[in-house]
Amino acid sequence: MSLVWLRVALLCYTVGLLYALVALTRTSEILSKIALHAAYLGMVLHLVSLVEAVHQTGQLSLASVHNSESLLGFLIMVVFMLVYLVYKTTSTGIVVFPLVFLLTFIAATGQQPLVFNSTAVQHGWLAAHIITIFTGYAALFVSFGASLLYLLQERALKAKSTRGLFSRLPALQVIDDIGYRSLMLGFPFMTLGLIFGTIVAQSAYHRVDFSDPKILLSVLMWAVYLVMVFTRLTAGWRGRRAAWLASAAFAAAVVAWVANYFSGMHRFIAS
Amino acid sequence: MRFQLIGVNHRTAPVEVRERLAISESRLPEACKRLADHPAIAEGMIVSTCNRVEFLANMKNGTGDLREFLSEYFAVDPSQFERHLYEFREDDAVRHVFRVASSLDSMVVGEPQILGQVKEAYATARAVGAVRAQLDQLLTRAFAVAKRVRNETAVGSSSVSVASVAVELAQKIFGNLNGKSVYLVGAGKMSELAARHLLAHGAASIFVANRTYDRAIRMANEFNGQAIEFTRLYETCDRADIVITSTGAPHFIFRPEHGEKFLARRKNRPMFFIDIAVPRDVDPELNKLDGIFVYDIDDLQQAVATHVADRKKEAEKAEAIVNSEVEKFHARLQTLDVVPTIVSLQDHLETIRQAEIDRVRGRLGAMSPEQEMAVEALSRGIINKIMHTPISTLKTAARDPESTTVIELVRRLFNLQDKERAQEKEAAARSAGDPGAHN
């Protein structure tokens, strides 16, 4: 059943994806309304699917890669909705919807290739690790999206073009606020997530292997994140420079995610 | 319908004429009442703003002329104003009301105030009972049309003056202008105007720097701002989010190295330079720095020009909407116009029925309640059945331009008297709100 809900949610997200594609070329009030409602409905169904999955397995362990992708997609939607509630703009959807669609799509294929069955799964620290680090990922992604929109808007303002995408994006400072707030929201979660991860690793393997690619990349990602927060707070970096950093952090995050498949310590099948 | 509208507006009359015809807010209720009480007029309302004075009436018959009211009310010979007056009747009056409410007849097409002003005028006239039936329908429709125009076209959405474009751009950069500070470098008329616009949209503090310090102080006082000596310009300028320059300097005052310094001190928070000086005060190279946006007078005027062109295109769309709405309204009123005939037809038959029942009663003597009811039901049933087809035919015919012949025919067939016309008008006025009431 969980998978059925997820697939219906995926249909709803498809509307969001269409919106993202159309929004690049023209404005449509109606479409953005439809997309918003569809996304909201999809989010609710997504939650139902997640709850049911947890209910079935009886634990918040996200026992498969696909469930975790589903959770990540869901959390990104939550951040998107928060942004919408505060700023009344669906513009971030241009970046958010395609990624959520992709994550949900992978999760909804229903194949369950990699399954946790290590003893660590039972551990409460692991659940805390996953939830916090995913919230961090979600916030980081929204921040990354916002900095891309910032670049677009800045370029339009400098080019003095009063038409096109310019007229549809929110004000520069609003985009900046969205990016800044999600950055500041994400950083503590990411930090906590890494700390919890260390605790999990300690208790499971009694050591933390820093030469392991997953851990190396995670620490690298965190370092880039730290630089972003630091430059933002001290020098007020935004625009192009912030976008470069955000892209770097995002790339590191993606690589760290992919590293799940190669890591000796962070495998979904216990070694 | 017998709609008439006469008036003057910013295009037809100079302000001296408009102010002589203008009716102040306090005198408006009384004026509306007098308009509606005029013997030739059934309903009336008056729109009086600084750009237009218009008298709209639903006449009792086709011969009346609103000018009579003008000459009585203002105690002048209206021929004095004749060359400034415009006059619309029937559908043209409807179209004009729709256009005014949709802001298509405004000096700045699409400006939003006029709709509110018409709404107020309508509320005033309604409160004194000067607007009751068909005018009420007309105005209600006009507001709906205005809403449609606003929703379906972009006629009111873009700024068409340099100052408002500057505000729009500032909002595009800073979002909300609340608490933003504005720095005026050089004190000119144009920069003053732009500053006023920015203040009206929430900008909080104003700094003024000018080569003649006295002038800076005077201008700063006007805005409740702070005057700054020109020599301290570079050390203070980073305090401002928006800088408006209009000095007569022959060379650039702000160069990229200044911009870099400002940004460092501002922790890279964006700055918006509005350069209305010719020759320019701000080096265009500044626009290449991250976080600094420079618009010169040409850029602003370019934006204004595009917006004006956009509005023209949108106004065409809006005119099409108005035209289709005028047609719809016309059709609707025609259906309403047939109501008096239907009512008098029903009255006519009802009188016959009552007379016949009385006659029967006289012949048969007292009837039992059951008999009474049976006779009542029988006679009523027959009349309703017979009436059904003619009434629906009348209603269909009303939508047809030839309808008057059918309506006239029915009147003649049943010998519906002309003297009833007056009462019918009243009945129509009452039933206008609920045209289905006489089925």
Image (cartoon, grey):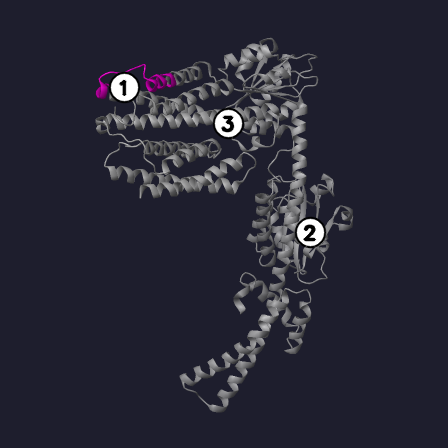
What segment is highlighted magenta in the picture? Answer: A202-221
Q: Position of residue B175 (x, y in %)?
A: 51, 28
User: Above or below — where is B48 with respect to B232?
Assistant: below
Residue contact at pointers 2 and 1, CB within 8 angstroms: no
Q: Which mark is residue A198?
A: 1
Q: Determine the secondary structure under disc 3.
A: helix
| Residue carrying label 2 | B73
Q: Give the amino acid at mark 2.
A: Tyr
Q: Give the amino acid at mark 3.
A: Leu
> Which part of the image, by quadrant, shows the N terminus of chain B?
bottom right
Residue contact at pointers 3 and 1, CB within 8 angstroms: no
Q: How many marks?
A: 3
Mark toward the viewer: 3 or 1: 1
Q: Quadrant of residue A210?
A: top left
Q: Is residue A64 left or right of residue B419?
A: left
Q: Determine the secondary structure under disc 2.
A: helix
| Residue carrying label 3 | A149
Classed neighbour count for the residue bearing mark 2: other residues with Cα under 10 Å, few (<14), some (14–19), many (≥20): few
Q: Is residue A191 left or right of residue B87?
A: left
User: Above or below — where is B380 with respect to B280?
Assistant: below
Q: Is residue A14 left or right of residue A262?
A: right
Instruction: For mark 2, name the chain.
Output: B
* Residue B177 shows in this picture: no
At x 68%, y 19%, the residue is B277
Q: Position of residue A113 (x, y in %)?
A: 32, 33
